[in-house]
Amino acid sequence: MADNRPVRIITKQTAVPGRIPTGTTGNESNFIKQGELAQNTVDRKLFGYDGTNIFEYGSNTFVGLTGGTITGDTGVIGALSAETFISGSTNLYDIFQVVGTDTPHTQVQPGSNITTGGTSVLPIISTVASPSFNSITSSGASSFVTLSATTFVSGSTDLYSIFQPQSGVLKQKNGSVSGSTFAGNPKKATVTFATAFADNNYAVTITGTASRTWSIESKTSSGFTINANANLAFASDEVFWMAAQIGESN
């Protein structure tokens, strides 16, 4: 009598999430041969082996799940996982380019809020939300808006302009005034500081090639007036001045 019972095919299987079989190494529980099937009942995935790669049935492409090479243009839709590494000839600019309403810029290090712009010769790097970095190297002329207390600058950086003491050091200013700017009788000229002193508690010294008895008037924190105490003009001469805070430095 013929046996009409249905034939049951039971594949190798696992109930461990994320586990896939291997076609090259391993023990009998996770090893499959070419043409053999294995399934993950938790992930609801069916796998096969073509002699080279383990692949998942029903996926768009049979890319090796344990390694392999993708050739040609490849598009990634969605986020790249943290375990994805890009190297070699990959064009990172094309992947991480961010196009906004202004000039396009490149996301150099996603997640750290670093963007570059400008030109290849003079790039612009801006940090947003004060991220923390272990090491930053900058070559050429660099301009920083704010440096934190833990930032150390050395080499050819103009340390004086960055770390100029704001207390304990007497400030000084100096300059010159052309004789042609003196006007009136007696001849006078006004000196205005680029940045004012805290007050008018400073001393002024006046020298010049013209023989005059110099004096100062209208001294304020922002400047003073030089009086030549003579009516004779001296257009070709320079008058030099020096202003220094009164007191003792530390």
Image (tube, grey):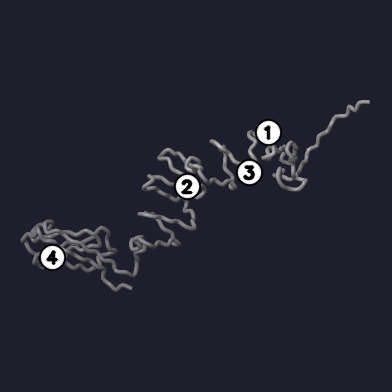
Q: CA distance from mark 4 to mark 2?
A: 57 Å
Do residues under tags 2 and 3 come within 8 Å of each other at their CB atoms? no
- Residue 108 is tagged as 2
Residue ID at (35%, 62%): 159
Q: Nearer the viewer, residue 81 or 204?
A: 81
Q: Amino acid at mark 4?
A: Gly
Name the secondary structure under disc 3: loop
Do residues under tags 1 and 4 come within 8 Å of each other at their CB atoms? no
Instruction: Point out the tag, 2 or 1, that comes first from the N-terminus.
Output: 1
Instruction: Point out the tag, 1 or 4, that comes first from the N-terminus.
Output: 1
Q: CA distance from mark 3 to mark 1?
A: 19 Å
Looking at the image, residue 11 lies above or below residue 239 = above
Badge 1 is on which residue?
58
- Is residue 45 visible to us here? no
Residue ID at (24%, 68%): 244
Badge 4 is on which residue?
208
Q: Give residue 14's position: percent from left, percent from top.
A: 76, 43
Q: Quadrant of the C terminus?
A: bottom left
* Front: mark 4 or 2: 2
Looking at the image, residue 142 lies above or below residue 107 = below
Q: Is residue 92 left or right of residue 11?
A: left
Name the secondary structure under disc 2: strand
Q: CA distance from mark 1 to mark 4?
A: 93 Å
Name the secondary structure under disc 1: loop
Q: Is residue 66 left or right of residue 167?
A: right
